[in-house]
Amino acid sequence: MIIGASPAILRTQQFITRIATHDAPVLIEGETGTGKELAARAIHYQSRRRERMFVPVNCGAIPEQLVESELFGHRRGAFTDAKEDSAGLIALANGGTLFLDEIDALPLKGQVALLRFLQDRQYRQVGGKQFLQADVRLIAASNRNLTQLVANGAFRDDLLYRLKLLYLEMPPLRDRAGDATLLARFFMQMGAERFNVAARDFHPDTLTWFERYAWPGNVRELENLVYRELLLGEDGPIAMADAGVREQSERRNSPDRRRVEFDGMSYGEAKARVLADFERRYLLQLVARTGGNVTAAARLAGKERRSFGRLLQKNGIDRELFVS
């Protein structure tokens, strides 16, 4: 269920309804935490395939050497650990929808195999000799721009064209005026039921901060923040003690407010301010992009995990706010 009343999300919901009526591949792009899987489920359950299975899979979680086996299945003895036959995800989703999240993580060999299936709806299991057929609607999602990846040689252009027959871009929370407050109250009720605790109100200053904050982790970050404050915050309305400080800092991190004010500082002080501003924005983007996975974020930054963790601590960044 996609919660929201902003013009941006209402347009998205209307477009999802239109997409659902056309039985064709869909590509969904958007920042981490914007609700790409929710959109994929909405498309499936509003389509003619709603009575059949919706099969989600995270491409980034499949080892490269097992991609074809996971998607198309394998025959017993096809490789060392193939102790028995496996049907594969394509067969599981037959008649329904296969949702490939983080499609950008699919290795080139897997991209070729997927493209071949999209062309004629036929596939062959690893170690198998017969071609099988499946009626599957494919929905793919990425938090990276696949067009840019194609330009860099990291993604096949012919696969992109096949996937992008229907295209949906999920709006970031910062562009959804009023939805942060609506979502915060929704998550409060959900959290109260989930954790069997009493729901709490939000202090007006906190609600104001919700609408001003840039939300680099989008809806997922908001959800986890509400749950954390519900469980660990003090009694009474939720009034985040550091809201004013964080608002001031994060407004500088917002895409439309990247300028740092120097206020007559010396050269050394101004340089330190710029570097600190860059460091925090850079860390926030990496942690948001990796869904709170510090190891993955450290790898992208080219740093050891321990030193990267110290940088997060130094900048007051809680990776738990970005974990799904």
Image: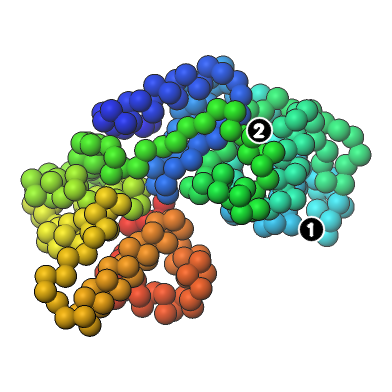
Whether residue 256 sits left or right of residue 126 in the image: it is left
Q: Amino acid at mark 1?
A: Asp
Q: Position of residue 252 (x, y in %)?
A: 23, 59
Q: Which marked residue is nearer to the observer: mark 2 or mark 1?
A: 2
Whether residue 113 sits left or right of residue 184 in the image: it is right
Q: Position of residue 123 (x, y in %)?
A: 80, 35
CA neighbours of label 1 inside 10 A, class few (<14), some (14 to 19), many (20+): few
Name the residue at 46% across, 65% down.
Answer: 297
Who is closer to the viewer here, 184 or 244?
244
Identify the residue under disc 1. 81
Q: CA distance from mark 2 to mark 1?
A: 33 Å
CA neighbours of label 2 inside 10 A, class few (<14), some (14 to 19), many (20+): some
Using the rendered image of the protein, determine whether residue 86 is visible from the camera's viewpoint.
no
Colour scheme employed for the rendering of this structure: rainbow
Using the rendered image of the protein, determine whether residue 173 is visible from the camera's viewpoint.
yes
In the rendering, which numbered label is found on residue 162?
Answer: 2
Please report whichever mark, 2 or 1, sits nearer to the chain's N-terminal start.
1
Q: Amino acid at mark 2?
A: Arg
Residue at the farthest right position? 129
